[in-house]
Image (tube, helix red, strand yellow):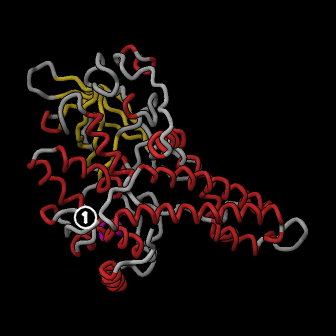
């Protein structure tokens, strides 16, 4: 593992730093972090990056990228994070949906969608999870049947849930059940859909953090052309794996207030004996644990970055990051709110350490342990693909989906 830039990487980092210094926003756009009044600022920043070749660095020139390397994308992400940039509502579309379209759609479809998405003109969402399936994508019950008029069109009916950004998305990719007589992994087909279709209803889910970033999405008689199909009929699981692979290759950092912010707050908050809370031995032990976890996560990410730098594909160990960081975020935020005593129930940001960052983290963390694959799903991936342990018993693997308990 090498934590240092190569000479070429150092030169690219300097180039990125100079561009960001000249072009990045000087202050935060403010407002709703899940869209709302920041959308104009987000779209403007995305367009500026696209014009300079920084929107999707690894994409080939024919699709608007510079044809750069994964490590160059990592370097740009690291440097961009040092600036007060607006929220990124394009991450799911550009990181997962559009690459799937680029892999499986026809040329006309790719020419229609890739450019506008890259420039931030259109936003995409991923319609995978369902109320009865959750992280088990292959348990999808949303049905797509061919129209009886012989047109070749498909009619989609069903429900998706926990769809991030559906309320402001223009398009989406949806996994549907097209053959209930096949085993659950073999009867799926994926389509792209226009989110403005009158048969699609989006209902934002009000979260206890006050935001509504997740949504329920209902499909009622949604008619799509066969040209909107991504991949072969009943081959949707393979298409989904391409989408999920793009999701898990993303290199992300921690979310919310971390151990260093907790340390800062513990120095300022009064403890039980009237002195600073940081002098409490039990609290110091927790801080030490969180510091060790944070360093472990940093070096696990460095393994991924080193693999990218060498032109290699990162392995499934990237699943470790979310399992550890989401739980740490929840535990740390809970301890911070308890440490604040009566201030832990106050909602006025002006009276709270870090303007209520720990309160937001406490309410957001449970969702983070579900989004992008539950803790249990990711632990299975780590156990089977990293540690080489025997796979889970899957009793519904080879039986028709309609005969499986989740298919009824």
Residue 330, percent from left and from top? 63, 53
Look at the numbered disc 1 and give the secondary structure of its residue: loop
| Left or right, 241 with reference to 295 | left
Residue at x 45%, y 37% (from the top left corner): 135
Image quadrant containing the C terminus: top left
As for residue 96 lying within the magenta part, the answer is no
Residues packed near mark 1 inside 10 Å, few (<14), some (14 to 19) or many (20 plus) = some
> Can the viewer see residue 38 in this picture?
no
Give the residue furthest to the right: 273
Q: How many discs mark residues in the rendered view?
A: 1
Residue at x 26%, y 34% (from the top left corner): 236
Residue 333, percent from left and from top? 66, 58
Prevalent SS, magenta region: helix
Image quadrant containing the N terminus: bottom left
Span shown in magenta: 38-45
Q: For residue 150, what is the image quadrant?
A: top left
In the displayed structure, 219 sits above or below 277; it is above
Q: For residue 87, what is the image quadrant?
A: bottom left
Task: Tell me the residue that label 1 is attached to.
Answer: 58
Residue 357, percent from left and from top? 61, 64
> Can the viewer see residue 370 in this picture?
yes
């Amino acid at each position: 593992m090498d934590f240092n830039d190569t000479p070429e990487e150092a030169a690219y980092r300097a180039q990125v730093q100079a561009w960001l210094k000249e072009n990045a926003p000087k202050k935060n756009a403010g407002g709703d972090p899940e869209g709302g009044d920041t959308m104009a600022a987000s779209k403007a920043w995305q367009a500026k990056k696209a014009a300079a070749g920084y929107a999707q660095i690894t994409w080939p020139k024919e699709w608007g990228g510079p044809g750069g390397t994964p490590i160059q994308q990592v370097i740009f992400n690291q440097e961009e994070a040092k600036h007060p940039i607006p929220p990124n509502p394009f991450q799911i579309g550009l990181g997962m949906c559009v690459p799937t379209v680029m892999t499986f759609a026809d040329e006309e479809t790719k020419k229609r969608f890739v450019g506008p998405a890259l420039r931030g003109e259109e936003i995409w969402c991923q319609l995978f999870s369902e109320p009865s399936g959750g992280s088990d994508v292959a348990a999808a019950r949303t049905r797509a049947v061919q129209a009886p008029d012989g047109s070749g069109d498909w009619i989609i009916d069903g429900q998706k849930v926990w769809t991030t950004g559906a309320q402001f998305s223009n398009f989406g990719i949806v996994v549907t059940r097209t053959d209930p007589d096949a085993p659950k992994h073999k009867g799926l087909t994926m389509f792209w859909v226009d989110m403005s279709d009158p048969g699609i209803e989006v209902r934002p889910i009000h979260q206890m953090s006050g935001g509504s970033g997740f949504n329920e999405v209902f499909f009622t008689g949604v008619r799509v052309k066969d040209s909107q199909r991504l991949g072969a009929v009943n081959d949707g699981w393979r298409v989904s794996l391409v989408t999920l692979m793009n999701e898990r290759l993303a290199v992300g950092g921690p979310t919310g207030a971390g151990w260093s912010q907790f340390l800062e707050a513990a120095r300022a908050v009064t403890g039980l004996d009237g002195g600073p809370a940081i002098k409490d031995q039990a609290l110091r032990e927790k801080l030490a644990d969180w510091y060790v976890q944070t360093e472990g996560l940093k070096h696990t990410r460095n393994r991924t970055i080193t693999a990218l730098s060498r032109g290699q594909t990162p392995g499934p160990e990237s699943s470790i990051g979310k399992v550890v960081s989401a739980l740490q975020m929840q535990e740390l935020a809970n301890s911070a709110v308890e440490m604040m005593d009566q201030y832990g129930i106050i909602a006025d940001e002006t009276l709270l350490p870090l303007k209520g960052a720990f309160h937001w983290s406490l309410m957001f963390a449970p969702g983070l342990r579900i989004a992008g694959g539950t803790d249990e799903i990711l632990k299975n991936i780590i156990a089977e693909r990293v540690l080489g342990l025997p796979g889970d018993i899957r009793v519904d693997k080879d039986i028709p989906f309609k005969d499986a308990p989740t298919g009824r």
